[in-house]
Image (cartoon, rainbow, N blue to C red):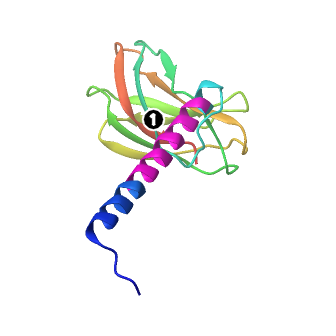
């Protein structure tokens, strides 16, 4: 086997790094382009959210994900809820999951998600009747 000289090796290494960088940039660009055209992220990917849930039994929803497996449990990693407890469920025009009561920041939950595959699903958070506006953030997936 022929030995590669130092300068040639450096050039090959730079070309490889440039190629990998281009692939990563193109992949990110395709993901952004799909999101801009209303194509929802798939359910296996954890998607971050940062919302304000209106107080006094108000509610707010995350952006949608498209389910890939009918009836699979949703996952929620609730990073922060400003010290408040909330209720959460999966939410869809195709039907909602049951409410998970008294969730708090710093915890991970599995949520009922009965929707069929290929349906858009979001999380719906609701505050308690006596609580004010509550900021929440974390990550979630619908499968």
Rendering quarter of residue 81? top left
Q: Within 10 Å of the Cα at label 1, are there few (<14), some (14-19), or many (20+) other Cα atoms?
A: few
Work out whether 44 lies above or below 89.
below
Work out whether 2 lies above or below 103.
below
The rendered magenta stretch, by its main secondary structure, is classed as: helix
Query: Looking at the image, which is closer to me, 73 or 12?
Result: 12
Residue 56 magenta: no
- x and y, in percent, of residue 113 in the image: 61, 43
Residue picked out by circle 1: 101
- x and y, in percent, of residue 96 in the image: 65, 33
Rendering quarter of residue 95? top right
Total numbered badges shown on the rendered structure: 1
Rendering quarter of residue 117? top right
Query: Looking at the image, which is closer to me, 13 or 117?
Result: 13
Residue 20 magenta: yes
Does residue 50 appear left or right of residue 119 in this picture?
Answer: left
Outermost bottom residue: 1
């Amino acid at each position: 086997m022929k030995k590669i000289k130092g300068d040639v090796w450096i050039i090959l290494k730079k070309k490889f790094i440039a190629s990998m960088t281009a692939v990563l940039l193109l992949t990110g660009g395709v993901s952004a382009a799909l999101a801009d055209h209303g194509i929802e992220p798939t359910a296996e990917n954890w998607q971050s959210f940062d919302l304000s849930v209106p107080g006094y039994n108000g509610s707010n929803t995350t952006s949608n994900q498209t389910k890939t497996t009918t009836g699979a449990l949703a996952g929620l990693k609730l990073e922060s809820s400003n010290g408040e407890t909330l209720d959460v469920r999966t939410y869809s025009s195709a039907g909602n999951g049951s409410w998970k009561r008294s969730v708090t920041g710093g915890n991970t939950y599995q949520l009922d998600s009965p929707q069929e595959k290929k349906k858009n699903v979001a999380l719906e958070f609701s505050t308690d009747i006596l609580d004010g506006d509550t900021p929440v953030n974390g990550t979630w997936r619908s499968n």
